[in-house]
Image (cartoon, rainbow, N blue to C red):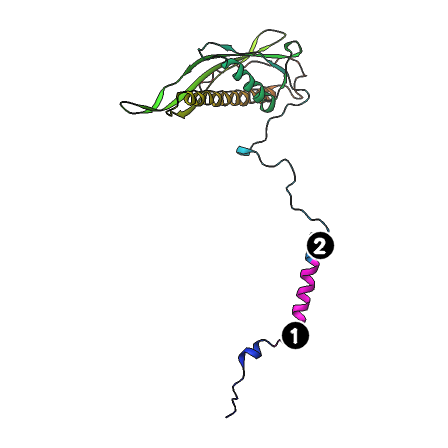
Amino acid sequence: MRNNIPDSTSQSSVLSPQHLVLQARLAVVLGLLSLLVSGCGYQFQVEGPGPVLGGATPATARAEAPRLAILNFENRTFQPNIELKYTSYTRHEFSTGSGVRVVTDPGEADLLLKGQVVWVILPAVSFSQSQTFEYRVTARVEATVEDVKTRKVVWKQGSTGSSEFFLTTNIQFNRVLQDRALEQAGIMIATDLAARFFAYLDSAAQSAPQGGAPAGTEIPPLKPPSQGKN
């Protein structure tokens, strides 16, 4: 007998003229899009400086911003050369986030920042009856800013930073870890001092007469100067 059941496979492979026209149009559109993207050199990018951690814009010094010289810190601890590292961290943070122009020559400055590393402690934070596993390095810096012309202290601030490290079986490597923790604490202190000084300048600018004081004039001190208990 002759099989009158239509072949579904052969029927599904045969497209109607309308389907062929739609496929042709789709191919033309896709081809034009690919030419536009590759030929015209389209690129996707973000305009502007991009986001900043914390959602804030870094404080940059304006042309009329006071000039600040940061003298080498005084070391009152038993940690060798810590004052040089902490001075370097503070200069970097103040030059990028305090609203002043940091200068190297004190003779060209309107303000002088003096700092002291007053103490460093290393308490154990994780231990057993027979072994210590983790230490916390904590450092304290006291900073003052003087007006060059009047020699008056216009700003005073203390800041404390800390960082932890785990002990290993290698004594020399433990010393490296301790030094790294000291550095982290110093960077935290420098960042905190710069942020607090920028807030002080912003507060002084808002309380100044309209138009602001001219560059190089005395900055009014806070009353009383902030002591900054971490």
Which percent across, then down, holds residue 102? 62, 18
The label on residue 190 is none
| Foreground residue among 105 and 2 | 2
Element marked by disc 2 = helix
Is the residue 7 above or below the residue 156 in the image? below
Is the residue 178 above or below the residue 154 in the image? below
Q: What's the amino acid at mark 1?
A: Gln
Decide whether residue 17 is among the magenta residues. Answer: yes
| Foreground residue among 33 and 158 | 33
| Foreground residue among 216 and 14 | 14
Residue behind mark 1: 18
Residue 56 lies in quadrant:
top right
> Mark 1 or mark 2, which is nearer the start of the sequence?
1
Residue 16 lies in quadrant:
bottom right
Q: What's the amino acid at mark 2?
A: Leu
Locate residue 57 relative to residue 169 in the image: left or right.
right
Which percent across, then down, holds residue 184? 48, 23
Main SS of the magenta part reads helix
Identify which residue is drawn at 54% across, 20% down. 89
Identify which residue is drawn at 65% across, 19% down. 65
Which percent across, then down, holds residue 223? 52, 14
Residue 134 lies in quadrant:
top left
Residue occupying the far right of the picture: 40
Is the residue 42 above or below the residue 9 in the image? above
Identify which residue is drawn at 71% across, 54% down. 36
Residue behind mark 2: 36
Specify start and end residues of the magenta stretch as a single range.
14-32
Which percent across, then down, holds residue 162? 43, 22
